[in-house]
Structure formats: C-alpha cells, structure tokens
Image (cartoon, rainbow, N blue to C red):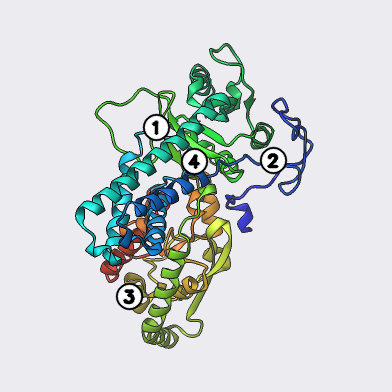
Amino acid sequence: MTAESTVASPGHQWAPEGAVPVLAPRGPAAGRRGTPGRGVRRPRRTSPAPLWLVDGGAALLGALALPTQHRHPLVVALLTLGVMALNRRAALYDTSAVPGALDELPAVCGRIAVAWAVVVALSPLRSLPVTALVVAVAAHCAVAWAGRAAVHGLRRRALRLRPRPALVVGPLATTRLVSAALLRQPDCGVRPVGLVADHPEVVGGAHEGPELPVLTTVLEARRAVVQNGVRTVLVVGAATRVENAAMLRALAGHGCVLWELDADPPSYGIGGNRRGAGHLAGFSRRLLRPEGGRRFGGPGKRTLDVALSGALLVLAGPVLLVCALVLRVLDGPGVVFRQERIGKDGRPFTMLKLRTHRPASAHEAATRWSVANDQDMSRFCHFLRRTSLDELLQLWNVFRGDMSLVGPRPERPYFVAKFSQAHPGYPERHRMRTGITGLAQIHGLRGDTSIEDRCRYDNAYIDNWSLWQDICILLRTAAQFVRPTGS
C-alpha cells in the first residue's frame, strides 16, 4: 500500500480544461482556459504600500519635530524600521479588512511609543528634554493616525463603488441568508457572486434570498474565482471547516482570504477577544488561516530541531552504544529496527528505533498495533520501552528532516488508512512534520489510548503552533522521560 493511497495530500491539482463555466464571464479574461501558469487570472491583492508610505512619512515628520541638534538620519531609519516591524507583527498591514478611523488608534500609537522608547535608549536622544520628546511622539502619532485613516477612507469609498466579489461557503440555507443580508448592505464592501454548498443534495426548492449560482465542486469554485476575480471567501456554519477542508485549502491556495462568519444568534455570557475579529454587515467574523494557506513551523522550528537533535545525538551516543551492545548480546544481530511510517503531507519515510521485538512476519510488523506488554520480550527490552530509550534513534530522523522533535506521532500506512476512515480529522495531522513527542503524548496519550483524543490534541497543537509551545512540550517530556508509560 502506497502513501498516496492512505493520506490525501493538502496540495491540489488543477482539473481538466473541458468543464463548463459556472458564472457569467466578466472582463477580458472571460472564457480563458489553461493551467496555473497560462491564461489564469488570480485575484488581485490590495497593496499595503500606501500604509508603508504613511508610516515612513510619519516617522520622518516625528523626527523633524525634534530640536535641530537632535535630528539624525539614524533616528529616522530606526524609527521607520521599528514601527514597521511592530505594525507588521500586529497585522496592521493586512489589507483583507478595512478598519474604522478610530479602530486601530490604540495599536498604532502604542507601537509608535514603544519604537520611540527603544530609539531613545539606543541613540544620543537620551539627553533630549522630556517635553521635546513628548511633542515629537505626539506629532508622530497624529500624522500616522491621520494618514492611515485617509488611506482606509479611500479604500472604503472604493469598496462602496466597486464591492469585492465573494463566495459564501456553508449550508445552502445559511449561505442564502447571509448573501441576502450582504446584498442589503452595499456599504459593507462585499458582493456575493456564488454559493458553495457543503450538501449538494439539498440544492433546489423554495427559498428566500438572491438567485446566485450554487457551486458544488472544487472545479466550479475555482472557475468562479478566476472569472469573477474573487479574493474574499466567507465561511458560515459550525461544521463547514471540517466538511469542506479540501475546498477551503484549494481556495486559499488560489489567493483567496477566508473569513469565518457567525450566522447564529450570540451565546450571551460566553465571550472572548479573538485576534482578527470584527464584523461584516452585523455578522461577527474572524480571519481563518487554513492549513493550505499557512506554513506551520517554519525556519525557527527547523533550527530548533537541528540544534537540539544534533546536540542530543552527541550526548546520547554513549547510551545508545551501550544499549545496542546489550541488545546484541541478549537478542543477537539486528539491533536497529526500521519501519515505514507516514510523515508530512502523506510522504513515507523509514523510522529508526532500537529493536525490542522481532515480528513473526512483515504483515505482523505492519498491522500489529502494540507490543508493549508482549511476554516474549526480555526484561531489558521492557526497560527500553518503559523509559523510551528505544526512541532515541529517532533523533537521527529529526536531524535528517524526516521528523521533528515535537509533532504528531507518525504511524504505519495500514493504520493511517484505518484511522483516516474512522476519524475525519485524522489526515489533518499530516499538515506538519511528525514528531518524537507532542501535545498528545504529554497528556498521557501513548500506546493503547484513544485515537480520537490523540487526533484532537494533535490538530489543536498544529492550529495553535508556536516555538514557545514546542519548548514547553520538550520540557514536560523531559520531566516525564523516565516514567513507565509504554509506547
């Protein structure tokens, strides 16, 4: 059984060219067909350049408000770079939404104040009078806020004149309700052009709302994106993200920004501040970052993996050598166990362990779930499994890049196919490199434990990944390293 037959890759392929267009052609690109490299118009992105210019100009004017003897080019450069870095970190250059004039005032002014504090601490401005510093910071804040408000106002006016085309994804009845509400509010800047139904069998029948095309396949949705220049996708319905994961990945990969809309009445008493939240025509919304449009981990995670696995291989080398010699003496040759496992994006790799059990056949090795309590194992092999010393060879897999130190545990192709059929979220675990330890493992989910619980913890880890979370999991794993957990 190949990896391709067990795990669906998050990537997507373009369908054949012969499909019938879904929506009425618009513009000179209408009716074109082709592959992603030819004849396909991707949604046009709104450039953040005007906001960069505003922030750079505000930093310059803030520096000019200083006394003449304190105006240094270095001050302007540090202020500009510092403010831009902080604003980028806070997603203040995100052009997928247009905030109100006062909405981002605290965030903008707070980051300008932080940038000035750093510049003052690192430059000759330490001798600057407090009054002059306050005037310069106030001028900087006022110009930045006024400039950004003007940019947002122009964009808001442009959206009123030419609203963004959007697809609405979710249960058909709900998407029609949301679309009708958006069309009644033209000032919201979004114009639905198609509905993506997650249950195509319910298409048809009497309904309220606009007569919009109902799209039921990934191909139809992509053609709607190309023909209408769609860059905004509105996702409604509590179960939509799971049921339409492939659809949302494809749309995100085609350049669309995904927003989740809450079309249900609010649950009073249950609240919270979610980053990226806001409203659209009265519907609560937040930015979605599906796995297809987001890189999990990145260079920071890989750097941590290489540095720690390399150091641990050196430190654990003598321990591995002693264990291998003892296994050779007690159980004969063949102390290294090699087994095919499924890694990131469904790709197979060979995982290494110290051999603690000799399968009777290749079929048993591929399909037997656990041998932790096998009576045929020697006491030393049981010891290796209880202490997880048999897993140390996987540090080489981490160093090579097959695995990560932290991530969902890799499984054999047979069980990946089995669990993927039984648990809808199981294939989503393969969005990230598999790991030696993970969030599920530090919560006791090892060996013969609930696959559903493991799947939930693994996907929660990926959805909320951060480098600090990896460090915390590694520290908790080190504290549990000698506990008798089995594997």
Q: Do the residues labelled 4 and 2 touch (CB within 8 Å)?
A: no
Pick the residue in front: 32 or 302.
32
**Residue 383, numbered label:** 3
Residue 312, compared with residue 79, is above or below; it is below
Name the kind of residue labelled 2 in the image: Arg
**Residue bearing mark 4:** 95
Q: Are marks 3 and 2 in contact (CB under 8 Å)?
A: no
Pick the residue in front: 150 or 474.
150
Name the kind of residue labelled 1 in the image: Gly
Q: Could you tell which of marks 3 and 4 lies nearer the N-terminus?
A: 4
Q: Which of marks 3 and 1 is in front?
A: 1
| Res 167 → quadrant | top right
**Residue bearing mark 1:** 100
Q: Could you tell which of marks 3 and 1 lies nearer the N-terminus?
A: 1
Q: What element carries label 4?
A: loop
| Res 319 → quadrant | bottom left
Q: Which residue is drawn at 39% across and 40% down?
A: 276
